[in-house]
Image (tube, rainbow, N blue to C red):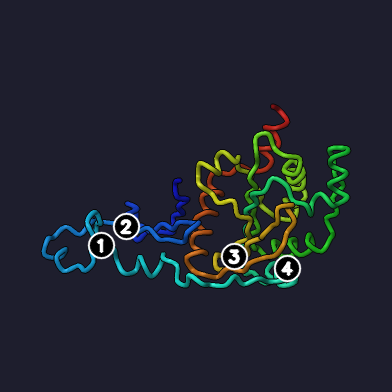
Amino acid sequence: MARQLRFNGTGSGGTGCPSVHEDTESGEVIVHGPPLTDPTDIAQLRHLSEGEVAVVVPRELLVDWTPKNATRQARIIDLDEFEGLFRTFSHSAWRLETRRRYASDEATVTYRQFVETGRVEWDENDPYCELIRSQTAQGKRVGRVRIVDQPPTTGQLYLLNNAKRNSRLGEDIRNLWRADADRLQLPAEDLWLFDSRLAARLRFDDGDHLVDVELITEPAEIVRYSVIRDAAWHHAVPHEDLAAKLSSG
C-alpha cells in the first residue's frame, strides 16, 4: 500500500532539493538530497547497510522542517477562546472550507429557507456580522476558499448563497473545484489561519458536527498552512464567477 506523504518544506530556493516529507499515517520522515559520493567520506559512516544511500542536507533543513516533538499534545480551545481570535487578529484571517456539509448549517432557519425556496433572508446585524464588519472597516483582511464538488452539494450551494452576505461584510470569498484541490494536493482539513502565525483547526465527527478546535502555533505547521493558503488562493475563483457559471450551465 502506497504511503500518504505530505511535503513539509525545502531548504532550496527554487530547485526543491533537498526536501523533507512526512508520512501522515506513521509519522516517519523522508529526507532527500544530494548523495554523499566520496568513498573516504562514506567509509567514515557507521551502520550504513547495503542498499542505503547517505544524503547531505543543510542543518537548517532539519531544524526548520522536521517534527520537533513527536509526542506534542493537541491544544484544544473552547468556542469562546476561538471566537476571541476573530477579535484579536492584527491583519488577516483566512479560512479553508473543505467539507461537503456542515451539520450546524442544516440546523438553521436560513438553511430551511434555502432548501424550500432557493432564497435566504440574511441577517447582517448578528454578532458575527458586526464583528467582521468592524474588523474589515479597519483594513484587516478576511478571506475564504471553499472547496466545491461537481455537482455542488446542497450545503455548498447554501454557502455560495451565504457568500453574498459575507462579501458585503468585507470578506473576500473564493471557490475551488474539488478536482483542482485534489490536483494541488490540498488537505481535507478545515481551518482558520490568523496573521500567518497561528491556526485553528476545526475538528468534526462522522456526523459533520463541530467537535472542538485545535490551536496550532508550531512554525513548520504554520508555514505549511501558509503554503496551502497561497496555492488555494491562486487557483480559486471569486464566488460570483462560480455562481454565474452554475446559473448558465
- Residue at image position (62%, 53%) is 96
> Looking at the figure, which quarter contains the C terminus?
top right
Kindly state the secondary structure of the residue where label 1 is placed.
loop
Report which residue position mark 3 lands on: 199
User: Disc 2 residue type?
Assistant: Pro
Few, some or many residues within 10 Å of mark 3 (<14, 14–19, 20+): many
**Residue 83, disc:** 4
Few, some or many residues within 10 Å of mark 1 (<14, 14–19, 20+): few
Whether pointer 4 and pointer 2 mark residues with C-beta atoms closer than 8 Å, the reply is no
User: Disc 1 residue type?
Assistant: Val
N-terminal label among 1 and 4: 1
**CA gap, disc 2 and disc 3:** 27 Å
**CA gap, disc 1 and disc 2:** 8 Å
* 74 vs 115, nearest the viewer: 74
* 171 vs 235, nearest the viewer: 235
Measured along the vertical axis of the image, is residue 245 above or below residue 77? above
N-terminal label among 3 and 4: 4
**CA gap, disc 4 and disc 2:** 40 Å
**CA gap, disc 3 and disc 1:** 32 Å
Few, some or many residues within 10 Å of mark 4 (<14, 14–19, 20+): few
Report which residue position mark 2 lands on: 18
**Residue 56, disc:** 1
N-terminal label among 2 and 3: 2
Whether pointer 1 and pointer 2 mark residues with C-beta atoms closer than 8 Å, the reply is yes
User: Disc 3 residue type?
Assistant: Ala
Residue 67 left/right relative to 116: left
Rendering coords of residue 222 (x, y %): 52, 64
Kindly state the secondary structure of the residue where label 3 is placed.
strand
Rendering coords of residue 185 (x, y %): 50, 47
Which mark is nearer the camera, 4 or 2?
A: 2
- Residue at image position (53%, 47%) is 234
